[in-house]
């Protein structure tokens, strides 16, 4: 369905609150990373999994040709996003955190529809009761270019994805289903 955009599963975090690698936790005989990968595969021409180099040996079994290793020297989800940009500077991308287990195809399709309707926007993300949800969103190469240049020039003041979102160039989509946008961070999920 979606041919012009790539997908990126964010699995490179430290999982410190969970106590083990969230991307490798299994539900219904699949890892959380595999579940997110399959959801994005329905909508994207190619999908990759972003991990840090220490995770490579475990993840290569599941994703032998679809790994993007963190290659920028910052922490957090922005590291995975900018590492994707380094590898594919001309591709727009839908990102999905591996721990957002309840995201539906309908929600992912809503992102894509708004991406097509709003080509002037750099980023498209959900807002849930005025809380930004940037770990399921679309990031254009044009928008990422500006962020990457700021990173290279050491002018990024903060490495939070929320902080890079320019309100003028970001489309915020209201989403009222709190459970669908939930990140599972603790063992009692």
Image (cartoon, grey):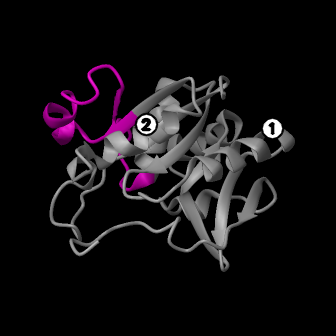
Q: Is residue 145 left or right of residue 95?
A: right
Q: What residue is at 32 percent from the left and 19 percent from the top?
A: 65
- Label 1 packing within 10 angstroms: few (<14), some (14-19), many (20+): few
- Label 2 packing within 10 angstroms: few (<14), some (14-19), many (20+): some
> Which badge, 1 or 2, comes first in the chain's sequence?
2
Residue 43, percent from left and from top: 59, 34
Q: Can you tell which of label 1 and label 2 is closer to the viewer?
A: 2
Query: Which picture quadrant has residue 57?
Result: top left
Q: Is residue 73 magenta?
A: yes
Relative depth, front residue between 91 and 59: 59
Q: What residue is at 71 percent from the left and 49 percent from the top?
A: 110
Query: Which picture quadrant has residue 93?
Result: top right
Q: Do the residues under discs 1 and 2 have CB atoms within 8 angstroms? A: no
Residue 189, percent from left and from top: 29, 71
Q: Is residue 166 left or right of residue 119?
A: left
Residue 116 badge: 1
Q: Is residue 127 magenta?
A: no
Q: What residue is at 60 percent from the left and 46 percent from the top?
A: 147
User: What is the span of residues highlighted in magenta in the rendered image?
Assistant: 49-77
Relative depth, front residue between 122 and 34: 34
Q: Which residue is mark 2?
A: 38
Residue 138, percent from left and from top: 63, 45
């Amino acid at each position: 369905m979606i041919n012009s955009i790539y997908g990126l599963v964010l699995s490179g975090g430290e999982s410190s609150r969970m106590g083990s690698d969230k991307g490798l936790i299994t539900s219904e005989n699949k890892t959380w990373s595999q579940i997110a990968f399959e959801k994005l595969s329905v909508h994207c021409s190619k999908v990759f999994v972003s991990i840090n180099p220490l995770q490579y040996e475990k993840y290569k079994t599941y994703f032998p040709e679809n790994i993007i290793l963190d290659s920028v020297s910052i922490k957090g989800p922005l590291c995975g996003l900018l590492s994707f940009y380094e590898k594919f500077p001309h591709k727009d991308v839908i990102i999905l955190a591996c721990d957002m287990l309840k995201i539906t195809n309908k929600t992912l399709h809503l992102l894509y529809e708004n991406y097509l309707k709003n080509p002037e926007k750099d980023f498209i993300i959900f807002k849930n009761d005025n809380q930004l949800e940037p770990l399921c969103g679309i990031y254009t190469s044009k928008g990422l270019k500006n962020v990457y240049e700021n990173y290279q020039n050491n002018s990024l003041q903060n490495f939070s994805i929320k902080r890079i979102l320019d309100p003028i160039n970001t489309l915020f989509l209201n989403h009222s289903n709190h459970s669908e946008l939930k990140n599972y961070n603790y063992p009692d999920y």
